[in-house]
Image: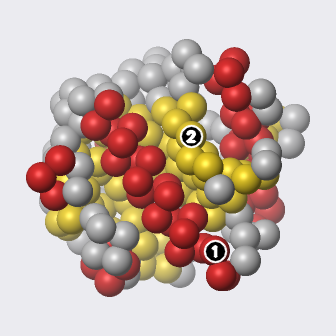
Amino acid sequence: MLSTTLSFENLHSHGELFANVFRARRQSFIVQQNWDLPESLGMEFDQYDTPASRWIAVHDQGEVLGGMRLTPTTARCGIYSYMIRDAQRGMINTIPHNLLYEQAPVAENIWESTRVFVSHKAPMSIRRRIHANMVKEMIKAARENGASGIIALTAGNWERWYGRCGLTARALGPMLTIDDAEFQCVMIDVNPRTH
């Protein structure tokens, strides 16, 4: 099992891995979760998949087992910035605009984590290892890009499992119900002293 951080600068070095991440996202979010998202050529994508982002892939022999997207909170693409901020600004109708207690951060040292998934094909026996590899690669990529914190809209039970993954985080907003599940915005600390 390998973990790779992909960017527009290095995707040429990783063969089909970049496209396979988007194929796995389609399977996870459009097929499995039935989300209404853009797709083309068997891949899911959105307005936040720009050269500013990074994509974490946990993979084995070309098969993507899990992944996520990291985007700087300073990102801009037309009218869009990053997902949590745009939701707060009322630009995403599937996420409540009151997801944060304060204004969404825009800072070079804060990145956003979105589109986190584990493949439905991954056996339960290796899912914890997939999560651990994703977290390790996320922390590494965030630090390499100058981040000290990662903002995320995550499952409401985050306090229970973040500790098991070695993450330190704090709530940034209220508990929300989205698609019949509980979610909450958090700030994940990626400073070296905590990991």
Q: Are marks 1 and 2 in contact (CB under 8 Å)?
A: no
> In this view of the protein, which residue sits in the foreground, 16 or 78?
16
Residue 28 x %, y %? 71, 61
Compare marks 1 and 2 and give the one earlier in the sequence. 2
Residue at position x 34%, y 77% in the image: 164
From this view, report whether residue 158 is shown above or below residue 77: below
Instruction: Say how the picture is coloured.
Output: secondary structure
Q: Amino acid at mark 2?
A: Thr
From this view, report whether residue 44 is shown above or below residue 54: below
Residue at position x 32%, y 31% in the image: 144
Q: Amino acid at mark 1?
A: Ile
- In the image, is 93 to the left or to the right of 147? right
Crowdedness of circle 2 by 10 Å Cα count: few (<14), some, many (20+)?
A: some
> In this view of the protein, which residue sits in the foreground, 145 or 32?
145
- In the image, is 88 to the left or to the right of 56? left
Residue 103 x %, y %? 17, 45
Residue 123 x %, y %? 73, 77
- Quadrant (top left/top right/bottom left/bottom right) for the C terminus: bottom left
Residue linked to disc 1: 126
Place residue 156 in its image quadrant: bottom left
Q: Which residue is at the far right?
A: 41
Residue linked to disc 2: 4
Mark 1: secondary structure: helix
Residue at position x 28%, y 37% in the image: 143
> In this view of the protein, which residue sits in the foreground, 128 or 117?
128
- Quadrant (top left/top right/bottom left/bottom right) for the N terminus: bottom right
Residue at position x 57%, y 64% in the image: 130
From this view, report whether residue 154 is shown above or below residue 125: above
Distance CA(mark 1)–CA(mark 2): 18 Å
From this view, report whether residue 181 is shown above or below residue 144: below
